[in-house]
Image (cartoon, grey):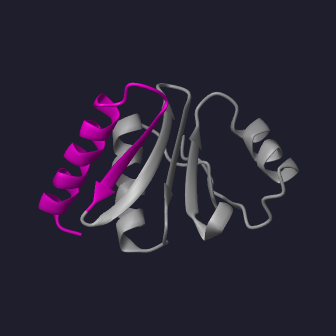
Amino acid sequence: MSEDCFQEDLLNVQEVLNSMTSYFTLGHIEEERFTVTYAQDKFLMITMKRDGPLLERLVKAFSKVVGYNPLCKYTDLGGMKTYEWDKINPNERITDLTRAGKTDIVKFIRES
């Protein structure tokens, strides 16, 4: 991905987060829609219809904006691809997801 493309993604992500009036909103990257659930300095979740380069770009941009990497990814209802960031209690979040029946959780190692 080019630096110009990454800068555009950062601006898109910042615009989405700045325009939020509640903890949930919709955004788009190119022609693909995504959902965002966000509580500043606590939790972030993005969901998109498909895994692939556009979702990877979003994950990279959101990680840069919030200042930490995602905790995990999994497939949500209807086959939606979901990434979660949890700054407060990531181990408890993994436990909650497991209890909720998520069977394809991929947990990421956090870089300090």
Q: Where is residue 109 in the image (x, y as percent from the top left)?
A: 63, 53
On the picture, is 90 further left or further right than 32?
right
Extreme-left residue of the structure: 4
| Image quarter hosting the C terminus | top right
Note whether residue 31 is visible. yes
Q: Position of residue 21 (x, y in %)?
A: 38, 25
Q: Where is residue 96 in the image (x, y as percent from the top left)?
A: 80, 42
Task: Please tell me in which quadrant of the rendered image residue 17 appears.
Answer: top left
Determine if the magenta segment contains residue 28. yes
Q: Where is residue 64 in the image (x, y as percent from the top left)?
A: 35, 44
As drawn, 74 above or below 90: below
Residue located at (87% from left, 49% from top): 99
Residue located at (17% from left, 51% from top): 7
Per the rendered image, the range of residues in magenta is 1-29
Using the image as rendered, state which of residue 58 and residue 31 is in the foreground: 31
On the picture, is 6 further left or further right than 23?
left
Using the image as rendered, state which of residue 71 and residue 84 is in the foreground: 84
| Image quarter hosting the N terminus | bottom left
Note whether residue 76 is visible. no
Determine if the magenta segment contains residue 112. no
Query: How many numbered marks have been drawn onto this rendered protein structure?
Result: 0
Residue located at (49% from left, 25% from top): 41
